[in-house]
Image (cartoon, rainbow, N blue to C red):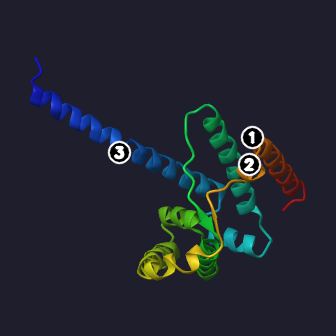
Amino acid sequence: METKKQSAENATVTDYIADKRPLLFGLGFGILFGFLLHKGGVTKYDVIVGQLLLTDFTVVKIMLSAVVTGMIGIYFMKSLGWIKLSLKSGSVGMNIIGALIFGVGFAVLGYCPGTIAGAIGNGYLDAIVGGLAGILLGTWIFAIMYPKLKDGILQKGEFGDITIPRLLKVNDWVVVLPVAALIILLLVWIQNAGL
């Protein structure tokens, strides 16, 4: 027969494992995402540069496919009550700072955060040395500057936690389905154009 102490220890272990489950799911999906990025070819520097030069649309095709899949999946799970969206409020200032950091890193190294993780997994030296160092350095600089930025530029043009359906005051699917259809039509057009 189990004592109270053993029961408490077992409950603690169970709670600890349950608390880590989202992290394990995140790790698993991250590995799967990296694998799919690799299989799609977007962890290669030449493919990314080709996208920036508008000669290779592999990245656009993969990202638009991911947007459609994610958008439909998230709102399907939300409509079934499986998940609840926790939106962060945004601002024009946050978008500008984020775009600058993302754009400079992308232009200098030729990788975005997702593709750099895949390229590191592939063992590409430029991604390991330049990319990993850039991510760590950029994060450190932003962390140092954050106290000054948070009450300044990051608050400029604050628009809250709004979504397009909320803004239009319509059901989510009134926006999701037409946007998904437009993205799919765009993907078909890109494919038929040979881009």
Q: Amino acid at mark 3?
A: Lys
Q: Position of residue 169 (x, y in %)?
A: 76, 47
Local packing at callout 1 (Cα closer than 10 Å; few below 14, some 14-19, many 20+) is few
Sequence-first tag of 2 and 1:
2
Residue matched to label 1? 171
For residue 28, the mark is none
User: 23 or 5: nearer the eye?
Assistant: 5
**Does the residue at mark 2 contact the one at mark 1 (Cβ under 8 Å)?**
yes
Toward the viewer: 17 or 80? 80
Q: Secondary structure at mark 3?
A: helix
Residue type at mark 2: give it. Pro
* Vertical arrangement, residue 68 with respect to residue 43, above or below: above
The residue drawn where x is 49% and y is 51% is 31
x 16%, y 34%: residue: 9
Disc 2, SS:
helix
For residue 20, the mark is 3
Q: How far is the residue under mark 3 from the one under mark 2?
A: 33 Å
Which numbered disc flags the more N-terminal residue, 3 or 1? 3
Give the amino acid at mark 1: Asn
Nearer to me, 70 or 27? 70
- Total marks shown come to 3
Q: Secondary structure at mark 1?
A: loop
Q: CA distance from mark 3 to mark 1?
A: 34 Å
